[in-house]
Image (cartoon, rainbow, N blue to C red):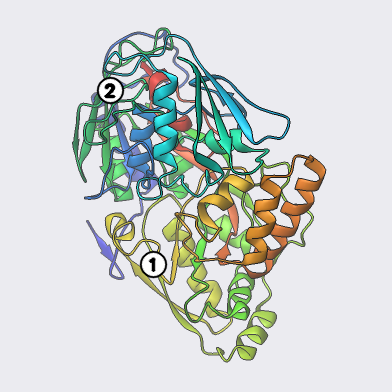
């Protein structure tokens, strides 16, 4: 790997890609652009995912890195989820419904679903899965499902059960309907994982690859098409692209934005581009200096030239954000004033906080396309206000290692979610991924009240008030919503762009086939 200014050289030129075309065609048997084929069974699908490391996991509940999430989509399925069009769809459930008070929810499971080991899916399995999800020692979903009464489950028949909540929750269906809330057998062992997904567990070599044979007893007729799926870790962007170019893999996630156009023009390759609500925040710990002073947090947000950030870090492939998440949520506070770069006001706030000569370390890693590039842009934008940001680049394994959620100033990536579900994951005091350590009691009360409010208009008012607090005092700098860009060989098809921001069409490996 070449070096430039002490950093890996991640540049790939048009010439470099063109000279790889012969190799790409030889390795993948590239077809002309637009070539069509009919679905056929068979083949070994190799996919390169950004990140991964020694902490790679197979657990259905609590994936962190891209390879973890890809494995979850291959192995497991939830009761419901957001599809590629961000529409809420039933998956393992036929129906999820509430009583008039929304404090008892009833779930009716699909008929004829079997786990990988041949055991039929029953209400007992779903109940055991949710009980595991609400166990804070074992699951990242505990905070978002905090309203579930651990003793409030009732089996109505083999496929039907009810869930008693500790308080009304008008949006419980969308909170339980998350990709990380997979349904597993009552005797689930994550070391020997069993799910209902299109692929079964074969092997895992942490930091390297995981192998999954097809589930030929899958409940969706005709799927999956391929015989085997292999997910390969690629912490380095250049290595991931070169693996696609050389035919070592058939698809990769998280294409560096600067390479999208060039890859899309390469014979034998296709890009997959989706407009999303996914975001790449800068994370400021509100409980540690200097970010324990709200004036410093406000100043950091005012340093950012957001259109320039989108243009330079995302090569223009994104949309403007306003330090808030969940733009597809109907309760998104689009009426709040758009925050823009204001260097004079940023300097004034820093002076008032006694931080005119602010120097901070920003921890970055290539955890998703655009993250490192955004960090580099921020360094230059902050310099205009006299703020010194020293970049500390680490590998993805280190970033999501023992210090994850402890960094004072860092970055991360998130997919599209509705506001209440997202806040439960990252902004409430008990949120498992509260990377900013935000713990505003008024904010928490507003979200809690909104969750139990049945009147949509009143719930919207409460969530707007909550978003105003986050907008003014939160620990995130959310500058844009990124497009999701992936790429694959023209010899495979079936990937569909997803507005959720989850790569490769919600890692839709089951629908992919060779042509």
Measured as percent of width and height from the top left, residue 26 is found at 24, 24
Judging by the rendered image, the residue that carries numbered circle 2 is 200
Q: Which mark is residue 157?
A: none
Question: Is 483 on the left-hand or right-hand side of 404?
Answer: right
**Quick one: quadrant of the N terminus?**
bottom left
Judging by the rendered image, the residue that carries numbered circle 1 is 406
Measured as percent of width and height from the top left, residue 131 is found at 42, 37
Residues at marks 2 and 1 touching, judged by CB atoms closer than 8 Å: no
Q: Is residue 237 visible?
A: yes
Frontmost residue, 204 versus 383: 204
Write the residue at 43% across / 26% down.
126
First-in-chain label (2 vs 1): 2
Question: Is 123 on the left-hand or right-hand side of 87?
Answer: left
Frontmost residue, 378 versus 414: 414
Q: Label 2's element? A: loop
Tell me if mark 2 has few (under 14), some (14-19) or many (20+) residues whose alpha carbon lies within 10 angstroms of its own: many
Tell me if mark 1 has few (under 14), some (14-19) or many (20+) residues whose alpha carbon lies within 10 angstroms of its own: few
Write the residue at 58% across / 43% down.
417
Q: Label 1's element? A: loop
Measured as percent of width and height from the top left, residue 130 is found at 44, 35
Is residue 142 shown above or below 442?
A: above
Q: CA distance from mark 2 to mark 1?
A: 35 Å
């Amino acid at each position: 790997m070449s070096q430039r200014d002490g950093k890996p050289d991640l540049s790939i030129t048009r010439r470099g890609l063109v000279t790889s075309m012969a190799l790409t065609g030889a390795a993948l048997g590239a077809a002309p652009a637009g070539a069509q084929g009919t679905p056929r069974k068979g083949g070994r699908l190799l996919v390169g995912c950004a990140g991964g490391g020694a902490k790679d996991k197979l657990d259905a509940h609590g994936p962190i890195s891209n390879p973890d999430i890809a494995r979850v989509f291959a192995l497991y399925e939830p009761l419901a989820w957001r599809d590629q069009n961000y529409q809420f769809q039933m998956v393992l459930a036929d129906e999820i419904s509430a009583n008039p008070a929304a404090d008892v929810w009833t779930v009716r499971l699909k008929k004829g679903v079997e786990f990988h080991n041949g055991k039929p899916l029953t209400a007992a399995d779903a109940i055991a899965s949710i009980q595991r999800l609400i166990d804070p020692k074992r699951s990242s979903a505990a905070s978002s499902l905090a309203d579930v009464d651990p003793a409030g489950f009732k089996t109505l028949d083999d496929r039907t059960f009810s869930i008693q909540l500790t308080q009304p929750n008008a949006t419980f269906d969308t909170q339980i309907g998350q990709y990380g809330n997979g349904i597993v057998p009552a005797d689930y062992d994550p070391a020997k994982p069993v799910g209902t997904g299109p692929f079964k567990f074969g092997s895992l070599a942490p930091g390297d690859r995981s192998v999954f044979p097809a589930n030929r007893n899958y409940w969706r007729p005709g799927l999956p098409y391929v015989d085997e799926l292999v997910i390969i870790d690629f912490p380095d962007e250049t290595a991931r692209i070169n693996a696609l170019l050389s035919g070592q893999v058939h698809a990769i996630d998280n294409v560096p934005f600067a390479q999208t156009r060039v890859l899309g023009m390469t014979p034998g390759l296709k890009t997959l581009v989706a407009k999303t609500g996914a975001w790449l925040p800068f994370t400021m710990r509100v409980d540690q200096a200097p970010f324990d002073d709200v004036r410093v947090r406000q100043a950091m947000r005012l340093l950012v030239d957001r259109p320039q950030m989108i243009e330079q870090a995302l090569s223009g492939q994104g949309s403007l954000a306003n330090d808030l998440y969940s733009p597809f949520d109907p309760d998104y506070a689009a009426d709040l004033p758009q925050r823009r770069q204001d260097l004079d006001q940023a300097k004034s706030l820093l002076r008032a906080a006694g931080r005119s000569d602010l120097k901070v370390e920003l921890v970055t890693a290539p955890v998703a396309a655009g993250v490192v590039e955004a960090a580099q842009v921020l360094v230059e934008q902050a310099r205009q206000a006299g703020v010194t940001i020293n970049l500390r680049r680490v590998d993805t394994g280190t970033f999501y290692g023992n210090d994850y959620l402890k960094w004072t100033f860092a970055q991360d990536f998130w997919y599209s979610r509705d506001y209440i579900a997202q806040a439960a994951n990252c902004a409430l005091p008990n949120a498992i991924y509260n990377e900013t350590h935000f713990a505003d009691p008024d904010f928490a009360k507003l979200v809690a009240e909104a969750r139990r409010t049945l009147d949509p208009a009143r719930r919207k008012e409460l969530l707007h008030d909550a978003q105003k607090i986050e907008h003014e005092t939160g620990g995130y700098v959310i500058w844009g919503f990124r497009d999701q860009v992936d790429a694959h060989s023209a010899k495979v098809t079936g990937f569909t762009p997803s507005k959720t921001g989850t790569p490769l069409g919600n890692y839709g490996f089951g629908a992919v086939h060779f042509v």
